[in-house]
Amino acid sequence: MGIHNLNKVLKKYYTPVARKSAYFKTKKIAFDASLLMYQYLIAIRSEGVQLSAGDSSTSHINGFFYKVINLVESGIKPVFIFDGKALEIKSQEILKRNERRAEAEKKYSEAEQIGDKEQMAKFDKRKMKITQEHCDEIKRLLTHMGVPFLNSENEAEALCVQLCKEKVVDFVCTEDMDALCFGAPYLLRNPKKNEFQEYNLKEILEKIDMTFEQFVDFCILLGCDYAGTLPGIGVVRAENLIRKHQNIENILTELEITDYDFKHAREAFFTLKSKYDLKTVSINWTAYNRENVVQFLQEKGFDEKRVSTALDRYEKCKSANKGNQIRLTDMFKKK
C-alpha cells in the first residue's frame, strides 16, 4: 500500500528526475520483487512481446523474463528481494486486504454469471493474491538465468533500503513510497523500458523543509501499513500539524488523543533490519543455463521461437558487458 497520498504531497515541493536507463549502466539496483510480481500479475501483459497466451498465470514469469533482459541490456546490475513473513503490526492491514479480496471474489462470480467481461476483468485484478507458487516460479527462472536474489525475513523494501544505506547497492527500485520512510537515499519508481523516476531523499527533506524524523511522523499520519489514520486529519491538516507541533506526541497532546497507536510504526521505519550480515553475504551472478530456461518456459506454455530470440539478446548483452556485468562478487562489497 505504501503511504497514502505521499506522492500527491511531494508534487507540491519536489519533482523526481527522469533518468534514461543508460544513466544507470554498471549501477547496482535492489528491486522489490514481490511488488513487481504483483504488478505483472494484475497487468496480464508484460513488457515486450508476449511469449505465451499471456494469461494471469504466466504474466509474472513473462514480465520478469523481459525485465531481466532489458536491465542487462542497459548494463544494470540487479538483485531481486522477496518479501518474507509480514510484521505482526501489519495484521490489521492484512485482514482488511483479505476482506476486500473476498468481496472482489464475490463480485467477480456475480459478473461471471451474467457474462459481464468488463466487470470480470475489474474484479479479477482486485482478487489477485501472490502465492508461494508464484514466488517459487520466479526464483526458479532467476536461478536458471543466473540472476541474484535474496529472501527478506520481513518487508522486501526494508532490506532493499538497508542494502542501499550500507552502500551495497546504489539504488532501491519499488513503487512503495514507504521506502523513503525506511530511509532509502535514492529511490527509483515508475520503471519503463528505458526510463526511471529518481527520488533523492536528502533533496526531498530540504524541499519539504522537514527533518527525517518529522517526515516519518508525517507519513504515519497520512496512513501506512503499520498504523491507522486519525479521524478528521487529512493531508493538509496532517502537514500543518507536523509543521506546528514537530512530532506525533505533541500533536496527540494538543488534540487530547490518548488511543492512537503509532509507536510500532515509527519503530519499524527506524529499526527494521535484516538478519543478513551484509559484510559476508554472498550475492553473485551464478551460471546461466539456456537449456534450463527454455525447458522451464516451455513447461509454462511459452513459444520456443520467441524464447530463443529473447535469449539470443540476453546472451549478446551478457557477453558485451562481461567486463563489468558478469561478476558481482566485488559489487556487493562496501565502497
Image (cartoon, rainbow, N blue to C red):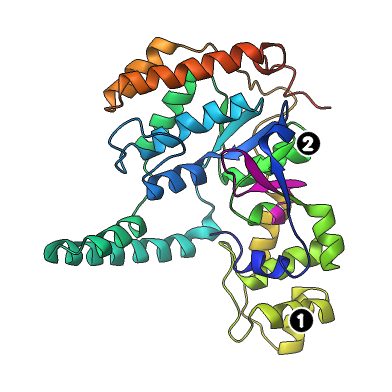
Report the residue at 30% width, 24% height from top: 303
Three-letter residue code for mark 1:
Leu
Q: Quadrant of residue 274?
A: top right
Report the residue at 43% width, 12% height from top: 290
In the rendered view, tell whether residue 51 sits above or below residue 112.
above
Callout 2: 10 Å neighbours few (<14), some, many (20+)?
A: some
Front-lying residue, 63 or 6:
63
Front-lying residue, 194 or 2:
194
Q: Residue 146: horizontal and vertical position, in percent?
A: 53, 18
Q: Which residues are magenta?
A: 180-197
In the rendered view, tell whether residue 63 sits above or below residue 2.
above
> Total marks drawn?
2
Residue at label 2? 166
Residue at label 1? 241
The image's mark for residue 311 is: none
| 88 in magenta | no
Q: In the rendered image, is residue 144 in sight?
A: no
| 183 in magenta | yes
Q: Residue 187: horizontal and vertical position, in percent?
A: 70, 47
